[in-house]
Amino acid sequence: MAIGNEKNDNFEESYSHSKVKFEIYGEEIIEKTVNSSGNSGRVYLPPGWIGIKVKVVKC
Protein backbone atom coordinates (compact mmCIF):
# COMPACT_ATOMS: atom_id res chain seq x y z
CA MET A 1 0.00 0.00 0.00
CA ALA A 2 2.83 2.43 0.72
CA ILE A 3 4.04 2.09 -2.86
CA GLY A 4 0.69 3.37 -4.20
CA ASN A 5 0.84 6.41 -1.89
CA GLU A 6 4.40 7.20 -2.98
CA LYS A 7 3.31 7.19 -6.62
CA ASN A 8 0.48 9.63 -5.85
CA ASP A 9 2.87 11.93 -3.96
CA ASN A 10 5.29 11.93 -6.88
CA PHE A 11 2.46 12.78 -9.26
CA GLU A 12 1.34 15.73 -7.12
CA GLU A 13 4.88 17.10 -6.94
CA SER A 14 5.39 16.97 -10.71
CA TYR A 15 1.88 18.25 -11.59
CA SER A 16 1.88 21.75 -13.03
CA HIS A 17 -0.98 24.22 -12.55
CA SER A 18 0.02 26.29 -15.58
CA LYS A 19 -2.46 26.76 -18.42
CA VAL A 20 -2.15 24.71 -21.61
CA LYS A 21 -3.76 25.09 -25.04
CA PHE A 22 -6.25 22.53 -26.36
CA GLU A 23 -7.49 22.32 -29.93
CA ILE A 24 -10.83 20.49 -30.06
CA TYR A 25 -13.02 19.70 -33.06
CA GLY A 26 -16.74 19.18 -32.49
CA GLU A 27 -20.25 20.12 -33.50
CA GLU A 28 -21.44 22.36 -30.64
CA ILE A 29 -20.08 24.15 -27.60
CA ILE A 30 -21.88 25.15 -24.42
CA GLU A 31 -20.28 27.25 -21.71
CA LYS A 32 -21.66 26.54 -18.23
CA THR A 33 -20.74 27.01 -14.58
CA VAL A 34 -20.47 23.88 -12.43
CA ASN A 35 -23.02 23.79 -9.61
CA SER A 36 -22.60 22.08 -6.24
CA SER A 37 -24.16 18.64 -5.90
CA GLY A 38 -23.43 16.95 -2.55
CA ASN A 39 -19.68 16.27 -2.39
CA SER A 40 -19.26 16.77 -6.13
CA GLY A 41 -20.16 19.14 -8.96
CA ARG A 42 -22.75 18.93 -11.70
CA VAL A 43 -23.35 20.46 -15.13
CA TYR A 44 -26.68 19.95 -16.87
CA LEU A 45 -26.59 19.37 -20.63
CA PRO A 46 -29.40 19.22 -23.22
CA PRO A 47 -31.38 15.95 -23.37
CA GLY A 48 -30.38 15.64 -27.03
CA TRP A 49 -26.80 15.05 -25.83
CA ILE A 50 -27.70 11.85 -23.94
CA GLY A 51 -25.51 9.02 -25.19
CA ILE A 52 -23.08 11.42 -26.90
CA LYS A 53 -19.38 11.53 -25.96
CA VAL A 54 -18.43 14.91 -24.44
CA LYS A 55 -15.22 16.43 -23.08
CA VAL A 56 -14.95 18.91 -20.22
CA VAL A 57 -12.11 21.44 -20.04
CA LYS A 58 -11.51 23.48 -16.88
CA CYS A 59 -10.75 27.09 -17.86
Image: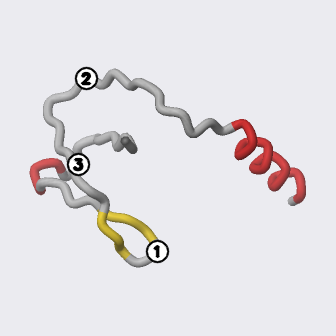
Q: Residue at x 31, y 60 (%)?
A: 34
Asked where in the image residue 38 lies, by quadrant, the reply is: bottom left
Callout 2–callout 1 Cβ contact below 8 Å: no
Relative to 14, is 9 above or below?
A: below
Give the crowd class for mark 3: few <14, some 14-19, many >=20 residues within 10 Å.
few
Q: Which residue is mark 2?
A: 25
Determine whether, in the image, residue 53 is placed left or right of residue 11. left
Residues at marks 3 and 2, CA–CA distance in whole angstroms? 18 Å
Along the line of sight, the residue nearer the viewer: 2 or 48: 2
The kind of residue tagged 3 is Gly
Task: Return the disc, 3 or 1, that comes first in the chain's sequence.
Answer: 1
Q: Position of residue 42 (x, y in %)?
A: 32, 64
> Which numbered disc, 3 or 2, marks the residue that appears first in the sequence?
2
Q: Alpha carbon of mark 3 to alpha carbon of mark 1: how far?
A: 25 Å
What x and y, as percent, mark residue 37?
Answer: 35, 73
Q: Residues within 10 Å of mark 2 (few under 14, many from 20)?
A: few
In which quadrant is the C terminus drawn? top left
- In this image, 9 relative to 27: left or right? right
Q: Are marks 3 and 1 in contact (CB under 8 Å)?
A: no
Q: Amino acid at mark 1?
A: Asn
The residue identified by callout 1 is 39
Instruction: Residue type at mark 2: give it.
Output: Tyr
Q: Quadrant of the N terminus?
A: bottom right
Q: Is residue 15 above or below residue 34?
A: above
Above or below residue 52? Residue 41 is: below
Using the rendered view, name the quadrant where residue 28 is placed.
top left
**Residue at image location 33% in from the left, 40% down from the top:** 55
| Residue under label 3 | 51
